[in-house]
Amino acid sequence: MIGAAREGLPISITGLGCHVPERVVTNDELARYVDTSDEWIRTRTGIRERRIAAESEALSDLALPAARKALEQAGVRAVDVDLIIVATVTPDMAFPSTAALLADRLGAGDAGAYDLSAGCTGFMYALAQAYGMLAAGLAQRALVVGGDVLSRILDWSDRSTLVLFGDGAGAVVLEAVDDGGFLGFELGADGAGGAHLWLPGSGSRLFDDSSRHVKMNGPEVFKFATRVLVQSAAAVLHRCGIAIEDVDVYVPHQANVRIIDYATKKLGIPSDRVVINVDRYGNTSSGSIPLALADAQADGRLRPGSLVLMTGMGAGLTWGSALLRWTKETA
Ligand code: UT7
């Protein structure tokens, strides 16, 4: 477990953007490929539909418009960004990194740029890392992207995974601000649980099954998720000396509405403070939290001074939380 409450320079999100593919795939459409039903998917997961990338679209194609929107909202020119981190498990390719490709397409050619892999928790890890780089004075303006094109690594004949995931990306700009900003982080990993959610054939380990399709032990990941969403949120709140009643906006990883409902009740957060969009996007992995943040902004919930609690969890198994005092007046 790593993380700390903040000391020193306030650093915050000053711009936010997201992008999803155009194609909407409903539960009924998936029922044409596998033995499932709209009723099962809605009642067991809360998902109604998801976005699926076109054949011509890779992660950088989703990240680019998201990043442009975030930069525009922050009023930051691409050329002034000096750090780009892309959190993903579905980069365009193993190398060059999607971050380097994105830097080039944005016109941020001099920025340090790399991809980061922490499963669905990637965006939380990347936020903490960018914060640390800025706080240490190693960078001045960071662009953090979380996104995945999981449809590429799903087995379209496996109902236990196919119905859960979708494609999408979100981006944020991090900069020093006058007040507010990140109050603290908490990150963790449990590699012993890694076998519950894995992608055989995706690296140097040889498997008999090298199909490169996501494999998941759903019930085990469900138990892990309900436990860590509560523990990680409680840990970051404790470190920052903040009471749960003071949280204005709760942005949990969007994997399953039953997991979110469990964590919300256990933490004691009123349901009107919880952001839920898993019904429209499914689980977009690293895209999940920035897409939910963008929804909270669109519906006017992110106001200057709002206290935002974000918690992610996913493959690794990993988890991560951040507490943020929203700084900027945004439309
Ligand atoms: O970012 C992290 C990524 N993953 C997650 O967060 C996933 C966490 N896990 C979950 O969300 C849930 O475990 C699932 C949604 C994956 C599964 O829900 P569940 O309530 O745990 O169902 P289950 O796996 O215990 O299966 C119950 C039944 C089984 O049938 P039998 O054995 O009772 O006859 C499954 O074969 O539901 C069946 N089933 C399905 N039926 C229709 C499993 N998937 C489907 C499906 N459609 N898509």
Image (cartoon, rainbow, N blue to C red):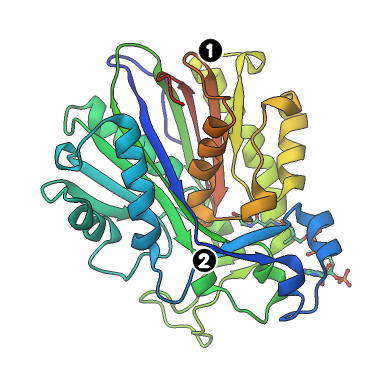
Q: Are marks 1 and 2 in contact (CB under 8 Å)?
A: no
Report, in whole angstroms, how far the alpha carbon at label 1 lies from the one at label 2.
Answer: 37 Å
Q: Amino acid at mark 2?
A: Leu
Query: At which x and y percent is residue 135?
Result: 25, 25
33 to 288, vertically: above or below: below
Quarter of the rendered structure image containing ligand 1: bottom right
Q: Secondary structure at mark 1?
A: loop
| Location of mark 1 (residue) | 241
Q: Is mark 1 within 8 Å of ligand 1?
A: no
At 67% from the left edge and 82% from the top edge, which residue is drawn?
Answer: 157
Q: Is residue 319 left or right of residue 107?
A: right
Q: Secondary structure at mark 2?
A: helix
Pick whichever, 74 or 6, lies toward us.
Answer: 74
Q: Quadrant of residue 47?
A: bottom right
At 61% from the left edge and 54% from the top edge, which residue is drawn?
Answer: 281
| Location of mark 2 (residue) | 150
